[in-house]
Amino acid sequence: MSKRTARTAMPGYAEMMAPWMMMTEMWRFHYEASAAAAEVILRRTLLAATGALSLQEAVDMVLEKPAAFSSALEEMALALAGGAAPQEAMRAAAVPVTRRMQANARRLRR
């Protein structure tokens, strides 16, 4: 019996695996977000230590956080208003923050 057949033949498999799949997805998100945040912090610290941190970068460090979190709140509210489950709303809220962190990491790599 193949794995696919075994899974479909096993009653309650999807319900049994749902928490594990959600935990795995949350771990993956946390890892990606943490890696991007750590990289941005490291690169900005090096820029500041060497005196190469521009005024615009220093201002962005402060102003980008409220903008990212307000976007996250907006995405979460839209998801909840659309009838999404709480975990789906949290996923939607995490997207703008993660996207911003990854964009910062890419920009600072140059």
Image (spheres, rainbow, N blue to C red):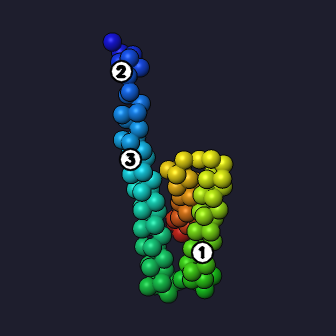
CB contact under 8 Å: marks 3 and 2: no
Give the image quarter of residue 104: bottom right
Label 3 residue SS: helix
For the residue carrying disc 2, how many other residues have a C-alpha within 10 Å: few (<14), some (14-19), or many (20+)? few
User: Looking at the rendered structure, which numbered label has been put on residue 66?
Assistant: 1
User: Looking at the rendered structure, which numbered label has been put on residue 48?
Assistant: none
- For disc 3, the marked residue is 23
Residue 3 seen anywhere in this rendered image of the structure: no
Q: Which of the two discs, 2 and 1, sits closer to the camera?
A: 2
For residue 42, side relative to residue 91 (left or right): left
Residue furthest left in the image? 1
Quadrant holding the C terminus: bottom right
Residue furthest top in the image? 1
Q: CA distance from mark 3 to mark 2?
A: 22 Å
Question: Of label 2 and label 1, which has the lower sequence position?
Answer: 2
- For disc 2, the marked residue is 10
Label 2 residue SS: loop
Quadrant holding the N terminus: top left
